Amino acid sequence: MQPVTALSIAGSDSGGGAGIQADLRSLNAFGVFATTALTAVTAQNTLGVRAVTMLEPDVVEAQIRSVVDDFDIRAVKTGMLAQAPTVERVSELARDGLLPHLVVDPVLVSTSGDVLMGDGGVDAYRTALFPLAEVVTPNIHEAAVLCGVDVRDVTDLDAVANLARTLLNMGPRFVLVKGGHLLASSSPERAPDLLLSRDGLVVLEAVRVATKNDHGTGCSLSAAIAAGLALGRDVPDAVRDAKSFVLAALASAAGWHLGAGRGPIDHLGWGE
């Protein structure tokens, strides 16, 4: 079998649960060969981020060009881009047609609350990268920041839908807002996401998995969407498949004890 190839442009997680490490496992789980371009190196574990070193945009671009010059890249996802100049450089490459089926996970803050984007990054996402994306996949907190809204004012799915509409007006073809955190206390059994395009709004329901092992779920979801697009699925089907994949990975790792904090998910089905 000849595998299709995708590209992850993201940061490294030394703990292995998120970032480019999670992207590699997610893409491979779908049978997609994964290539990478590192944007930053982080020193982190399940408890948080201890240090970050950002790579220069020239180095990021060199990695991307090396990959796309040699491989038939079918889809691309971005994760932690770390700084506004890197967001802008990736946008230039996308504008040149080098980043097909672009899935943008606008990583701003880690699961543990550590800031992972420098000054100007939010505006760079809004004005430079989102107009070139096929799908953007913010969580509820990222969506609020990107829309200039206090997340404490986002109290129901109608408010989440309003965020999605604001983001759609920034230019992407689809917006997937991960709304699971919104209902964690009021509805502990539900974990809905909202998928919006010019064709309408779809609420993707799922059961909530009771576990502290959820580190890297956003990275894994966006990588899984990119895998689906690389395999020729349309966006709604790729999103549904990705959501099912992450749900199964959460359930499979629910009883793991890897690290003292928020542990990783089971991308490869080891616990099944």
Image (tube, grey):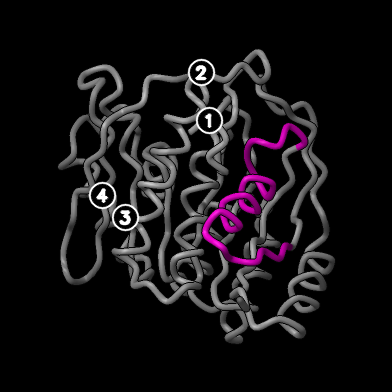
Q: Secondary structure at mark 3?
A: helix
For mark 1, does the 10 Å Cα neighbourhood hold few (<14), some (14 to 19), or many (20 or more) residues? some
Q: Are marks 1 and 2 in contact (CB under 8 Å)?
A: yes
In x, y percent, where is residue 15?
73, 32
Q: CA distance from mark 3 to mark 4?
A: 11 Å
**Residue type marked 3:** Arg
Q: How many marks?
A: 4
Q: Are marks 3 and 4 in contact (CB under 8 Å)?
A: no
In x, y percent, where is residue 142?
44, 42
Question: In the rendered image, which quarter is residue 58 located in?
Answer: bottom right
What residue lies at 66% left-to-right and 63% top-to-bottom? 34
Q: Which residue is mark 4?
A: 194
Q: Secondary structure at mark 1?
A: loop
**Disc 4 vs disc 2: which is toward the camera?**
2
For mark 3, does the 10 Å Cα neighbourhood hold few (<14), some (14 to 19), or many (20 or more) residues? some
**Residue type marked 2:** Gly
Of the image marks 1 and 4, the number of the one nearer the N terminus: 4
Q: Are marks 1 and 4 in contact (CB under 8 Å)?
A: no
**Disc 1 vs disc 2: which is toward the camera?**
1
Q: Which residue is mark 3?
A: 240
**Disc 3 vs disc 4: which is toward the camera?**
3
What residue lies at 33% left-to-right and 59% top-to-bottom? 175
**Residue type marked 4:** Leu
